[in-house]
Image (spheres, grey):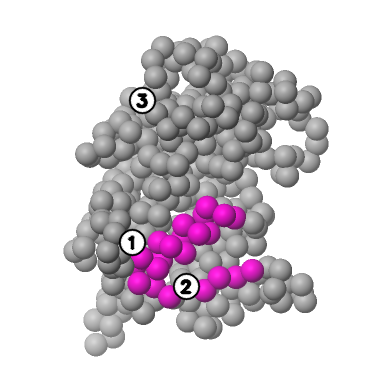
Amino acid sequence: MGRGVGMSGWHHRHILDLASFSRDDFASILELAQRFRSLPVTGVRKLPALQGRLVATLFFEPSTRTRSSFELAAKRLSADVMSFSPSSSSLSKGESVLDTARTYVAMGADVLVVRHRSTSVPQQLAADLDQLGERTVVLNGGDGLHSHPSQGLLDLLTLARYFDAQKPTPQALDGKKIVIVGDILHSRVARSNLWALTGCGADVVLCGPRSLLPEDFAAFVDAPPPGLSCDPVAQRGRVTVERRLEQALPGADAVMTLRLQKERMTQQLLTSLERYHRDYGLSHARLQLCGRQVPVLHPGPVNRGVEMTSRLLDDPSICLVEEQVRNGVPVRMALLYLMAAAESAAESSLVSISS
């Protein structure tokens, strides 16, 4: 793997959300992830790209796929990996999240992958570490209702590969109609996908009940991203809101359904799971509304018989859930590689300046 792959114009020190990504940024990630994905699955799997680097996964929330995927990605790039577990940490003794992070920084962590149930914790950590002059970079593994960048990117790769397996680029998404169904309100995955999909030119239709999909989501990408004076994407796809699948599905090129996040619901927002499945659950029969066979995605874990039928989930010709899991490792390898390469470039420039 050449040192310069995917590095052209990469300027993100931390990766906290996808709102600040340009179409070139998405192209860099897709290109690099596709290369990592095409590596042999047998024999020597490790690349020396991150040899001598330390990646720490600080997950203050439970995770199966994201944590395992990041740790495997780091190991395949020859990084050392440290895992943080809240249950056996000093958090129970009153230690702050920042002090916990600084402990790992003091032990030499180059990258902190941070997941937290509260919005903006990774952003605050990144700002605090920058203020302290630390070289450690922060990668958001999911924060509250705000963002899940790596999930948005692996969904992007999954769709791009479906539409053009040989050349999965942003152009593969341009003009496509992607329907996202369900609990948009509590979904950081939906928010990341809105930035990623529209950033690659796809039109997104959101579908769900008013209690889980406020009308103002139609304007989600209209204003410049938070903290930026202008949108890094010159022309995004459109976002529209529909209340019924009968209106949302016709003409769709792909459908993504989301887990009902009951643990984040602070009030009773649904009358019953049976009613939800009747109105918004996906099945083979319901997908016929699309007018042709289209792929179905779900970020997992799936509530069988709620978001989709077991028969649909277990149909690999339509359901891409396992493909999403497979794509998680190369996408996270790409993110870690680009962050480490950017840091090395910054260190080299500092050395040349000081000399």
Residue shown at 34% from the left, 67% from the top:
77
Q: Is residue 207 above or below residue 131?
A: above
CB under 8 Å between discs 3 and 2: no
Taking the image as drawn, is residue 221 in sight?
no
Label located before the other in sequence (2 or 1): 2
- Inter-mark Cα distance, 3 to 2: 38 Å
Taking the image as drawn, is residue 354 in sight?
yes
| Mark 3 residue element | loop
Can you tell which mark lies on residue 338? 1
Point out residue 15 in the picture as x, y percentages from the top left corner: 45, 57
Q: Which residues are magenta?
A: 63-85
Point out residue 176 in the picture as x, y percentages from the top left corner: 36, 25
The type of residue carrying mark 1 is: Leu
Q: Is residue 89 above or below residue 338?
A: below
Point out residue 343 in the picture as x, y percentages from the top left corner: 35, 70
Q: Is residue 353 left or right of residue 279?
A: left
Residue shown at 69% from the left, 23% from the top:
276
Quadrant that contains the C terminus: bottom left
Residue to which mark 2 is pinned: 81
**Count of numbered circles on the image:** 3
Q: Is residue 31 left or right of residue 227?
A: left
- Foreground pick, 288 / 27: 288
The type of residue carrying mark 3 is: Lys
The type of residue carrying mark 2 is: Val
Q: Nearer the viewer, mark 2 or mark 1?
A: 2
Q: Is residue 207 left or right of residue 267?
A: left
